[in-house]
Amino acid sequence: MNIDSINRWLSLAANFGVLIGIVFLAIEVRQNSDYMALQLEFGQPTQKIFDNNRDLQNSATAKIFAKAVENPKELTFEEGLVAASLVLNMLNEWEDRFLIDKAGLTGEIDWQEHISENIDWTLGSQFAIEIYRSNRMAFEHEFVDYVDGLLPQVPERGTYTWWTDLQSKFRN
């Protein structure tokens, strides 16, 4: 064998190696994209749900939120800030799901279904609706249009009704 023949074989082997490397790289990029989509879908929004629930486990915060639902006129400024923060955190979790979907990273949980399942509890008080309405310009237009479309179906005391409905199930 001469040098030219060896060079051709080495060049062919090198090109084949590069091709295999590109295929493996494409597979890894796809896996990383899938992993990123799962992490975004279940990581960030789920962490926000966890944080909101953790905040409501604090007795003082839970009392403030309940007061915002039952009698918002009696909230102090500080209590109003706490209750508004809880509502806005819940809305941000919803918008995160919307943005993940719009980025093409849709997974198992449909953002619209998630909102429609939780809107009575989240925006089921006059206080929460006012917080939403006064901050709606900070959210994406399509997101706001969807939430606005659901608002007429939300009971005025939906958060409280959620609780009383749950209580009646335990009494029966």
Image (cartoon, rainbow, N blue to C red):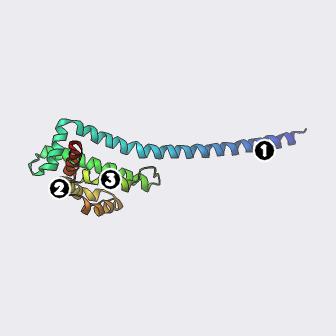
Residue at the outermost top position: 58
Neighbourhood count class around disc 2 (C-alpha, 10 Å): few under 14, some 14–19, many 20 upward? some
Between the C-alphas of marks 2 and 1, the distance is 72 Å
Q: Do the residues under discs 2 and 1 have CB atoms within 8 angstroms?
A: no
Q: Picture coordinates of residue 85 (x, y %)?
A: 23, 46
Which mark is in front, 2 or 1? 2
Between the C-alphas of marks 2 and 3, the distance is 19 Å
Give the residue type at disc 2: Gln
Give the residue type at disc 3: Glu
Q: Quadrant of residue 13?
A: top right
Q: Which mark is residue 117?
A: 3
Quadrant containing the C terminus is top left
Q: Secondary structure at mark 2?
A: helix
Give the residue type at disc 1: Leu
Q: Do the residues under discs 3 and 1 have CB atoms within 8 angstroms?
A: no
**Of residues 54 and 84, the one drawn nearer to the viewer in this rendering:** 54
Q: Secondary structure at mark 3?
A: helix
Q: Quadrant of residue 48?
A: top left
Residue bearing mark 1: 12
Does residue 32 appear to the left or right of 16 in the view shown?
left
Q: Picture coordinates of residue 119 (x, y %)?
A: 28, 54
Which mark is in front, 3 or 1? 3
